Structure formats: C-alpha cells, structure tokens
Amino acid sequence: MKILFSGGGTLGPVTPLLALVETLRGADDAADFEFVWIGTERGVELPFVRRAGIPVYTIASGKLRREWNFKNVTDVWHVVRGFFQARALLKELRPDVVMTAGGFVSVPVHYAAWTLGIPSIVHQQDVVIGLANKLMSWVARVITVSIAAHRAKFNQKKVVVTGNPIRPSIRVGSREKGIELFRLRADLATVFVFGGGTGAYAINRVVEDLVRECAGQFQIIHLTGTNRAQPQLTDPLYHPYPFFMGEMAHAYAVADVVVSRAGFNSISEICALGKPAILIPMRGSHQEANAAFVAAAGAAVVIDEMSLSAACLFDAIRDVLGDAARYAEMADKSSALFPMDSNERMVQQLRDLQNLS
C-alpha cells in the first residue's frame, strides 16, 4: 500500500501524519507500506519528513484567504501551477491513497487525486476548521475529525470521529528515567514548559522570573526552542534545553503539570498522557479556540498571552498542584477528552479505503 501524504507550511499539519507513519512502521505488516510526501518548496516541514526517511516531492503553493488580499490574485496562479505539478507526480508515483491534515499545498494535490480517481482522506484536527480543509472536503472520500462537534461541519456521510493521532513513542516515557535524565529531585513536583517546535518568546520571557517566583516550590524542565536565546540561570531546580532528541516522552512522564502553547498536536499528546495543563494560546490564532475547548472540558487552565506574567503563571501552577482533588479531576478529564485509540482508528480508515479502491 503506497500512501502519499501532503502538507506543510507549518508543522501543525505534519505532526499527526508523521505519527501515523510511526504507527504503521510498528505494525506487523509494516513491510507492506510505502510512504511518499508532497510539500512546499521551502517548507519548514522538509527536514522533519526527510529525517523520517520519507521521499519528498515539492510543488508550487499558494494560499487563498477569506478576506480580500491582492495576494489572492497572484496565488491563484501558484495553486493552478501546483495542480498540474501534483497531477504529474500522482501519475508517476501511483499512490493507493492520498492523505492530508491540512495546509494549502494539499489543496491542488487532493483535487488532482480526485481527477485521477485516487481516494483521499482529509483529517481535521483544530477546533476551528481551516479553509484548505473545507475546500478539500468536497473531493475527499473520507473526512476524519478529532472531536465529535466537527461531525456537523462536514458531509456526515464522509465523517469518522477518530481523535488526533499522536506519536506512539510519546507513550513509552518513564518517570524514573526522567528523574535520572533531567537530574531532578524525586520529592519535588515537576513542571514541564514548552512553546512548540521553535519555542515561544512570550512563554520563554517569563520563565526566568518564574524560577525566582517559585522559590524552590517546584522544579522546571524548559524546552526553549532552537531559535531562542537561552536563559542565563544557574538555579539547580531549573533545567533548560534548546531541543530534545528522544527525551520528550520522559519529560512528559515526569511532569506533574505541563505549560504549553495550544497547538492541537501538543494538546493531543498532553491529554493522551492524562496531564493537567496550563495553556497559553497564541494571541489572535486558532489556538485560542483549541485552548477554550480543553478548558471547557475541565482539563486545562488558560492564560491570555496579553496578561501573561511570571506571577500569574506561578499562581496558576500553584493552584493546580496545591489542590489534590482538583488535580485528580483535571487529570481524569484530560485523559478522557479524546479516544485513546486514535492512531488505530486512523490506520483502519486507510486500510478500509484501500480495500474499497
């Protein structure tokens, strides 16, 4: 079975697809699967996809915007050019199934697949449905969605509620290994802070003050991001890292509370592990709706980026850690928010689609 994935521009549409690749490579019939990828010509996704050992092809990509913008005129040409490039690639590569989790580079790919009779899956993860996914839903054979509320937003004959796939390796972390790896105290609560793959300045800038504010009440693992300045602190309870190789699972496992942006992939991983979260969504983005959804379920506390300070972040952490009943309730609601077998549900859709094609 040859699966052609598409997506890029940001890592949001890429991460769940790579999680599926990891799942399929661990299956008993892993040798029966072949993967290829179509992305953007200068996309941030390219190193991650290549690192996963997936051949990458690139096409021209444009972005259509809901509001009027002169770039809509010029980008139409890029979309048309991308369509013909994608069609030529699909005829050459001959995939059994085409799949995406969003991104405008995927729109011409999925329309090209439709003209060639190749079945496709569109996965909707964020609470707010992107324009690219709306456009592709018209020609998709199956639409998988992360939350049940999405069912009413698409053609219900196509929709399957799967949850959002996460990397299987995230589930195998060890608290004991985390204590050893990050040189932590076993008798002190641990807060894991990160702001996405490249870090988040709004979060990073308050951590230095947070370390002083907490005054030994908890210890902090801080994933700063590779493109961010590293805080110059020598506190033994503060453990900064610019990036992780294979340590992410152990950081999650040892964390009592996770402080994060509100990208849907991060939320999915946090909830899959049943961790209470403090979410700081990017102002004016789809992350605000993601964070509100998790908070409404009782699994997270949300801090507005505009009011973020070390003091308010410290208070939020202290409130979660200091109330045992509330902590247990948040952990329970976190683990119950999404299906625990999201990866398996997604894989089954791929298998079913191949059988029907």
Image (cartoon, grey):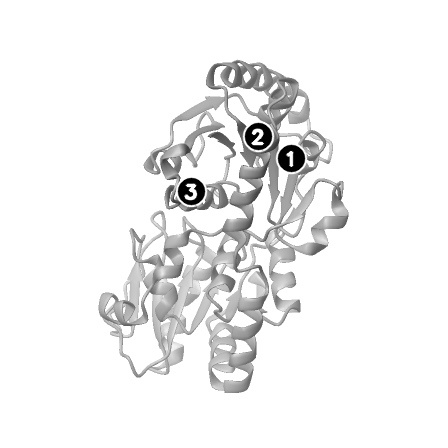
Mark 2–mark 3 Cα distance, whole angstroms, equals: 22 Å
Q: Which residue was labeled with disc 2?
A: 106
Quadrant including the C terminus? top right
Badge 3 vs badge 1, beta-carbon distance below 8 Å:
no
Q: Secondary structure at mark 1?
A: helix
Q: Which residue was labeled with disc 3?
A: 24
> Measured along the vertical axis of the image, is residue 41 above or below residue 26?
above
Q: From where the camera sits, is residue 181 visible?
A: yes
Compared across the picture, whether 328 is left or right of 22 comes to right
> Measured along the vertical axis of the image, is residue 274 above or below residue 104?
below
Q: Secondary structure at mark 2?
A: helix
Disc number placed over residue 132 in the picture, else none: 1
> Measured along the vertical axis of the image, is residue 224 above or below residue 176?
above
Mark 3–mark 1 Cα distance, whole angstroms, equals: 26 Å
Asked whether 264 or 54 is in front, the reply is: 54
Closer to the eye: label 3 or 1 = 3
Badge 2 vs badge 1, beta-carbon distance below 8 Å:
yes
Closer to the eye: label 2 or 3 = 3
